[in-house]
Amino acid sequence: MCAYNRLNNIYACENSYLLNDELKKAWDFPGWVMPDRGAAHSAATSALVGLDQEMPGGKYFDDSFKAAVGNGEVPMARLNDMVHHILRTEFAFSVFDHPPVLRPVNPFIGAEEAQRAEEAGIVLLRNANSLLPLDASRIKTLAVIGEHAEAGVLSGSGSDQVTPAGGTAVPGNAYGWHPSSPLRVMRARLPNAPVMFDDGIDIPRAAKLAASVDVAVLFVHQHTGENYDVRNLLLPHTQNEMIAAVAAANPRCIVVLQNGGPLTMSWIDKVGAVVEAWYPGIRGSEAVASIIFGDVNPSGRLPVTFPKREADLPHPSLTSLQYVPENADHHAHIDFPPFDVNYDKGLKVGYKWFEAEHKEPLFPFGFGLCYTRFAHSGLKVSAAEGLHVTFEIANTGERAGAEVAQVYAQLPQAAGAPFKRLIGWEKVPLAAHRSKTVSIDVDPQNLAIFNVQKNAWGLVPGDYTVYVGSSAESPPTTTKVPMGSEP
């Protein structure tokens, strides 16, 4: 699928270098190429550079494309090639041998799968004084605070929107809210304790309620989706002020984040716990409760870096980028004028930027807490075609859990890469007081750099420092191994 963007002022779906030279020739891609929805901008031009099908409909691949084939502008051989790529892939995936059959959907199995996926993906970011997991038998009163937290949990929009059986929890709202009510689930968890609710809009009222209960659980949100961007990395409306006020009234507060990307958190040191739930899904509240009450030991890890402040980002602001106001219809198509983004940071992308620029993040890439402790030891590395890495992981805590061990490498100085590079990882479930030897084989491509003059990938000769840890910035176990040939 080719993108909407232009690269060096050429639309991706009209870019012969991307579609022909790289994708189909260098990468030997045998499938077919189609545009992201509405990303095609021409008929003959797109077809000649490698576009095989238009989506949706036929705005360009219609009578004008037929005419281009008829007058020879698009050779018949190219049309045959387009058809070949499509049919070849359909045969490869048995579309003709085993055509898809419509079957009834089982919403119960789907909901259970969604809950298990969410439980595995939730990231515990903060757990001061081991506030979590909660012991339901010791809680006398609890408050659920947050907009629509009596009704459901947030979902995304566009292609990441899944409408559950029965529809959304907040009809007519521009956002999608899955009908998995945090308030209902918390009341089911605490049948013998009063569970009160406040929408958090009136901040003094929410703080007053929080001060009157044993524990407050705050469900907050930042909605994102296709075709628009957020204004900044703050929770919208007055949610940050609400969190600060509630935490001042009752530090035993748990913040449950419903969002699609990094956030800044001025209140982070004031709250008891932070649970990154992302978009929680069809059974999102049940999954969050499983983490909060300890049925599931959290094992999710951050796939992105959370900065302390927006000024630490490589591009703190994009002056030409427009955003959609909070009350807009996010399902409507919005045409933004084109704007340029200069990708001038080279290899320093994501966590690599923060390390290379010596900027301490709020939470590093790969970070995540759990309800037990893990130790790494015995790191051994041998070099052949790539690297063979072995080490021990021990669960030194009192309950079963899963560690996501991450292997990073620092390339030789000649590589010009002043940061560690993630080269492998493994999720390792372990019972309490048990250990396991982990082996990870690292493909040499994960250690290579690209030589522009030679138009080839290769290894830089020298010492490679290998790290094993729990995040991009955790105190690692390290060793060095010599390897490499000139790229």
Image (cartoon, rainbow, N blue to C red):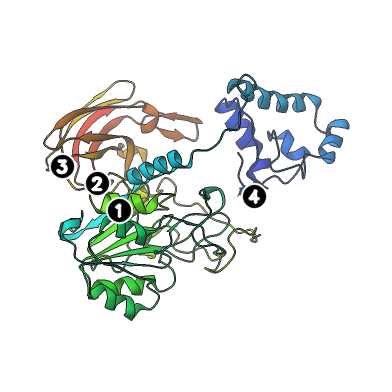
Q: Secondary structure at mark 1?
A: helix
Q: CA distance from mark 1 to mark 3?
A: 18 Å
Q: Residue at x 29, y 69 (%)?
A: 267
**Residue at the extreme right of the image, as rendered:** 71
Residue under numbered circle 3: 399
**Residue 299 higher or lower than 155, as above or below:** above
Kind of residue sitting beneath label 3: Arg
Label 1 crowding class (10 Å Cα cut-off): few <14, some 14-19, many 20+?
some
Residue under numbered circle 4: 9
Q: Residue at x 26, y 46 (%)?
A: 298
Q: Quadrant of residue 273?
A: bottom left
Disc 2 or 1, which lies upstream in sequence? 1
Q: Decide: marks 2, 1 in contact (CB < 8 A)?
A: yes
Numbered circle sitting on residue 295: 2
**Residue at the extreme top of the image, as rendered:** 97
Q: Secondary structure at mark 2?
A: loop
Question: Which quadrant: the C terminus?
Answer: top left
Question: Which quadrant: the N terminus?
Answer: top right
